[in-house]
Image: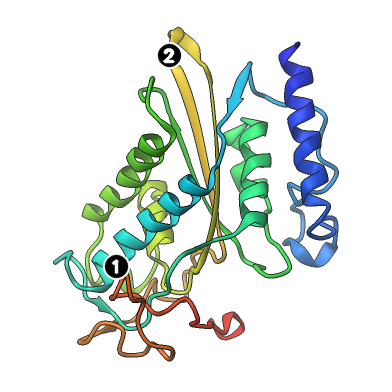
Amino acid sequence: MNYKILVYLLLLRTTFILAEFEDYCREDLCPTGRQHIGCNIPERSFCPPLTLLSITEVLKKFITDAHNHYRNYVAWGEDNHFDRACRMATMQWDDELAKLAELRVLNCNMEEKEKDCHNTENWLSSGQNIQVDHDFEGTSSILLFSLVFDRWYNASILMDREKIKSYSTENQDVNSFLLMMLDHNDRVGCAAISYDGKGGYLTYIVVCNYAADLNKNIPVYTACRETGASCKTGENSEFIGLCSINEKYDREKL
């Protein structure tokens, strides 16, 4: 099958799935001048022949567990670069964010990130991390995501307890780490593709969409002497440095 037809069919399949969620052409979903990635999906792609990675239930759990592992590590004060967190959410999977991430990877044009809007009715200020790599050939899906998340977290060496109080960086590597640590970020959805890139190397693109985005006027998280001191619904039984999955965040006040 012609790869352009294949990509179109993948886009069409994703479009039908997204139709279950909401009208993405609504003007109130995106900032002025930006079109939603789910509105009038183009019948084209910048991708060469590709493989869309299957996001299984096992992989979904791995992705959320990996995020929560790093969040718990920081919230509990295990990383001595940072203070403990007062009220850091447990990250959970969101199918809608994942399907919008799928549209993003099927486009392959990572140059357009700033123009991309991927908000939803539930998540009106959605954040996004993107990783493009060329040296993961032969890795499993779980190992791929593990390596990507390691890279995002490793940017933490460029931050400290003072800098994290006031987000003010344009460094995309640092932003990837900060988005993983944003305390009220309680939903994530990811997608990934692979294709034969230049020089014969296998290229991977990973996109993760989040419930919330970074805001220069809001701390990435609030520090406390006692981890989870401000959690209103108690701690997570598995990741005890995080609030329980029942914790609700008033995003209008954030």
Amino acid beneath label 2: Tyr
Is the C-beta separation of discs 2 and 1 under 8 Å?
no
Residue 18 in the image: above or below residue 13: below
Helix, strand or loop at disc 1?
A: helix
- Which one is nearer the viewer's eye here, 79 or 162? 79
Q: Which residue is mark 2?
A: 201
Q: How is the image coloured?
A: rainbow
* Residue at 48% from the left image edge and 12% from the top image edge: 198
Q: Residues within 10 Å of mark 1 (few under 14, many from 20)?
A: many
* Residue at 59% from the left image edge and 24% from the top image edge: 51
Return the residue found at the far left: 80
* Residue at 37% from the left image edge and 64% from the top image edge: 181
Quadrant of the rendering where the N terminus is positioned: top right
Name the disc covering residue 72, or none: 1
Q: Is residue 175 left or right of residue 249?
A: left
- Which one is nearer the viewer's eye here, 6 or 182? 6
- The span from disc 2 to disc 1 (Cα, nearest Å) is 35 Å
Q: Is residue 81 left or right of residue 12?
A: left
Image quadrant where residue 55 sits: top right
Q: Residues within 10 Å of mark 2 (few under 14, many from 20)?
A: some
Residue 93 in the image: above or below residue 222: above
**Residue 160: x %, y % from top left:** 22, 65
**Residue 2: x %, y % from top left:** 75, 11
Helix, strand or loop at disc 2?
A: loop
Closer to the N terminus: mark 2 or mark 1? 1
**Residue 84: x %, y % from top left:** 23, 77
**Residue 204: x %, y % from top left:** 48, 28
